[in-house]
Image (tube, grey):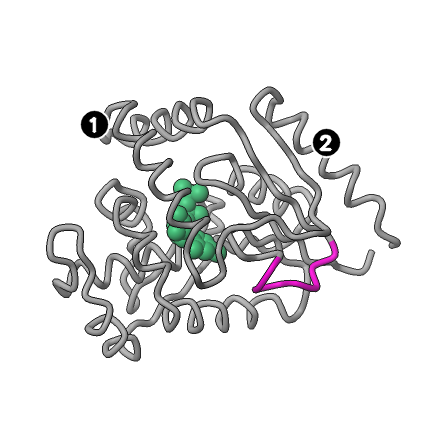
Amino acid sequence: MSKINIAIDGFSSCGKSTLAKQLAQHIGYVYVDSGAMYRAVTLFAMRNDFFTKMDLNEAQLIASLAQVEVRLAYDSKTQSQITFLNNENVEEEIRKMPVSQRVSQVAVVKEVRERLVFLQQQMALDRGVVMDGRDIGTVVMPDAELKIFMTASPEVRAKRRLDELEAKGDKVSFDEVIENLKHRDHIDQTRAESPLTQADDARVLDNSKITREEQLKLVKSWISLFPS
Ligand code: CDP
């Protein structure tokens, strides 16, 4: 079967990465987690003190962007993606709350987006890519054959994210998690640069009430509509 590109967009924590990983494994595609790249740049900004409490000094970040190298690699042992920031494995650190609380501010910066979108487009050139994010079907891969826009209720999303963080030993409250999701969704939808919107040709997938297996079956049935 000739390979296609699959774009998955949607709100925070609605299961985009779960679906993208499932799909990539089942059909032998490459999974690209675009959010991890924004998270890595955020960690870079935090470590270089470009944030004063929650305020980002955008000019400082833009001036230092040339020093940021973000790379995604696949660890076949754990069958998971690893994110590298200037050759350091930052996969664990970028998933924690301090980064989650700041990442949407970094993602509004035009120069950051231009740089990361370029890298993401390079990764998709050979097709056979499942990429998830906010602007994948609209900006990064507008020519993706299959576009999926995912949604789920805020409570379901917050519960899933809380379980994920607790499993890693992070002590956070439900309220803290739901506030963070709502805050990020708001910034992501209202920013001037590539806001989160549903592409006209996207299929909507609300997974509030369906299992992982059911969602995989549904999406595989969509994929089977493409000529092989
Ligand atoms: O996993 P979750 O859905 O919570 O977030 P993520 O995919 O790791 O993305 C983190 C943040 O990066 C989002 O809240 C967006 O602000 C930003 N992002 C973006 O602007 N564009 C993308 N293509 C991916 C992420």
- Residue count near mark 1 (Cα–Cα under 10 Å), binned few <14, some 14–19, many ≥20: few
Are the two marked residues, 1 and 2, in contact with CB atoms closer than 8 angstroms? no
Please tell me whether residue 218 is drawn above or below residue 70 in the rendered image. Answer: above
Please tell me whether residue 152 is drawn above or below residue 6 in the rendered image. Answer: above
The residue under the point 62% across, 53% down is: 7
Q: Quadrant of the C terminus?
A: bottom right
Please tell me whether residue 106 is drawn above or below residue 219 in the rendered image. Answer: below
Image coordinates of residue 15 in percent, x first then y, are 51, 35
Residue nearer the viewer, 37 or 181: 181
* Stretch in magenta: 138-145
Residue 158 within the magenta-colored segment of the rendering: no
The residue under the point 42% across, 26% down is: 160
Residue that numbered label 1 is attached to: 171
Image coordinates of residue 201 in percent, x first then y, are 73, 51
Q: Which quarter of the figure has residue 23? A: top right
The residue under the point 61% across, 30% down is: 206
Residue 140 within the magenta-colored segment of the rendering: yes
Q: Quadrant of the N terminus?
A: bottom right
Horizontally, residue 115 falls left or right of residue 96, namely right
**Between disc 1 and disc 2, whose residue precedes?**
1
Prevailing SS of the magenta stretch: loop
Residue that numbered label 2 is attached to: 217
Residue sitting farthest toward the right: 227
Kind of residue at disc 2:
Lys
Residue nearer the viewer, 169 or 221: 221
Kind of residue at disc 1:
Lys
Image coordinates of residue 200 in percent, x first then y, are 70, 52
Disc 1 to disc 2, C-alpha distance: 34 Å
Helix, strand or loop at label 2? It is helix
